[in-house]
Image: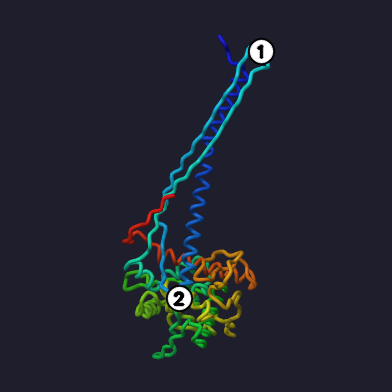
Amino acid sequence: MNILPSTFRAACMAALLGLFMVNGCASPIALHRAVLEYDWTVNRIESELLLLNIARMRYHEPIHFTVVSSIAATFDFRVNTGITGAITENPGLDSLSLTLGTSAAENPTVSIIPVQGEQFTKRLLTPISENTIQFLAHQGIDPAILLRLMARGIILEEGESHRRFILNQPHRKEEYQEFRQRVMHISWLQYARNLFIGPLQFQNGTKPTVGRIIITNYDPDSLPNHERQALHEQANRFPLNHIKVDIRHGYPGGEFPMRGEIHLRSFKGILGFIGRGIVQDQEFPVAPDPRTPFVMVNPAKTLTIQESRTQPAEAIVSAKKRDRWYYIEEESEAGELEDQWNHEAFDILYQLYHLTVTDISQTPAVPITISK
């Protein structure tokens, strides 16, 4: 009866152990890498589509979005092992050969949906609501970034019967300058921790009521109940894409008073504002009002998108339209503060894209499926 030498048994055990180790480690590593790659790819696609649609607006072309609705990937992991050897009766002449091999195959299926139809159009053209401004402002985002992106203008109440609309459009130079200065003042109030953005709360009879959102330089809860209710009624005369503003004398920043409503744009309006701002209707530098004590950062453009005939070497996102590249610089000559502003502005635009465009649960389109 032949008994395997101890060296051979040890090699067999090592091979078996190696088999389990390879089989147990290869699949999680490959899966981990694939999930991260898919996540990165989808994020890049959405960012480039967003930038591409801004470029379309620069050329007055229709905008169009396509979203990735699902990714189904099948992973095939295989391990091949082999042991060959020769056993002799002469000590020292035994031989052993061990082979181990692994392979992994990935077969993804991607479904994409062109976003279209009545529901998409309504979401695209419906103005941003006051609730979106409140939600984003409470994330600590500078109100100047939010309002320069999302506001079409400010309706100012001057006296009992006079109302004046100042537009956030550079071709209306004087109005645009005043709009920028008022937004900078609101931003300073936020920096000085004297800005309140939130819903009015009051007693309607005996019933506690949560009313419309208001921007103030005082705590609205400090007002008598009838004043809070009156402010709500004034705000409620307008649709939800208007935010009541009440910057009063006698409170911090009251030297530059402001009473009226901020009128919000639609998502398409925001894309148009940025797209036209690349060449046709460019924004320009505006100094703060003398009554505004301090402004940390005040870039000329709300969102700076570069246009070039050559592909950028370094950019956080880029897209090609016609024979030009459009991109957002990773680092610019303007400096770190303005770069941070620019990157945050694009991030807000990306969030608005998800809030406005990519609700595809009710999209009546047939998905396009691509298999690798």
Asked whether 171 or 144 is in front, the reply is 171
Q: 185 above or below 209?
A: below
Q: 121 above or below 362?
A: below
Residue at the spot 39% in from the left edge and 71% down from the top edge:
201
Q: 245 above or below 359?
A: below
Question: Three-letter amino acid code at disc 2?
Answer: Gly
Residue 239 pos. (x, y %): 36, 76
Quick one: SS at disc 1? Answer: loop
Q: Quadrant of the N terminus?
A: top right
Residue 263 pos. (x, y %): 42, 79
Residue 15 pos. (x, y %): 57, 27
Whether residue 121 appears in this view of the structure is yes
Whether residue 194 appears in this view of the structure is no
Q: Image quadrant of residue 314?
A: bottom right
How dense is the environment of label 1, judged by Cα within 10 Å: few (below 14), some, or many (20 and up)? few
Residue at the spot 50% in from the left edge and 85% down from the top edge:
171
Quick one: SS at disc 2? Answer: helix
Residue corresponding to mark 2: 272
Residue corresponding to mark 1: 90
Question: Three-letter amino acid code at disc 1?
Answer: Asn
Residue 276 pos. (x, y %): 49, 78
Asked whether 128 or 51 is in front, the reply is 51
